[in-house]
Image (cartoon, rainbow, N blue to C red):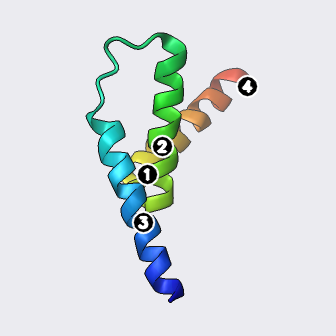
Amino acid sequence: MKNLWGGLVKAKLLKQWNILKGRSTRDMDPAERRTHGRAVKMVEKELGLLDDEEEEPEAEREEEEDEDEIE
């Protein structure tokens, strides 16, 4: 039964992700855009939709920023 509930939760999250991704941010103010972006990222993280390729450049950017601060 536990697996069934897990599947239903993932289905609901996927539905919410589809709604969020389809929503236009053109008419949003900056605060609403940040909230929208965070919600999308949270759902992607919960569903495991984040690609490893997308995460690597962030780590590389952080390393480059650290190197710039040292200089």
Tag on residue 36?
A: none
Q: Which mark is residue 44?
A: 1
Give the secondary structure at mark 1: helix
Is 19 situated left or right of 31 in this image?
A: left
The reply to whether the C-beta atoms of the residues labelled 4 and 3 are less than 8 Å apart is no
Q: Do the residues labelled 4 and 1 touch (CB within 8 Å)?
A: no
Q: Measured along the vertical axis of the image, is residue 12 above or below residue 66?
A: below
Badge 4 or badge 2: first in the primary sequence: 2
Q: Quadrant of residue 51?
A: bottom left
Q: Which of 35 and 61 is in front in this view?
A: 35
Residue corresponding to mark 2:
41
Q: Is residue 60 above or below residue 26?
A: below
- Which residue shows up at 53% across the image and 35% down it? 38
Badge number at residue 10: 3
Mark 3 neighbour density, 10 Å: few (under 14) some (14–19) many (20 or more): some
Q: How far apart are marks 3 and 2 (CA)?
A: 15 Å
Q: Which amino acid does label 2 sit on?
A: Lys
Within-10-Å neighbours for mark 4: few <14, some 14–19, many 20+? few
Residue type highlighted by circle 4:
Ile
> Which circle, 4 or 1, is nearer the viewer?
1
Q: Earlier in the sequence, mark 4 or mark 3?
A: 3
What is the distance, in whole Å, between disc 1 and disc 3 at their CAs? 11 Å
Q: How far apart are marks 2 and 1 (CA)?
A: 5 Å
Say which element carries label 4: helix
**Pointers 2 and 1 in contact (C-beta within 8 Å):** yes
3D distance between C-alphas at marks 4 and 1 = 34 Å
Q: Label 2: state its secondary structure.
A: helix
Farthest-out residue, bottom? 1
Q: Label 3: state its secondary structure.
A: helix
- Would you name the residue on which mark 4 appears? 70
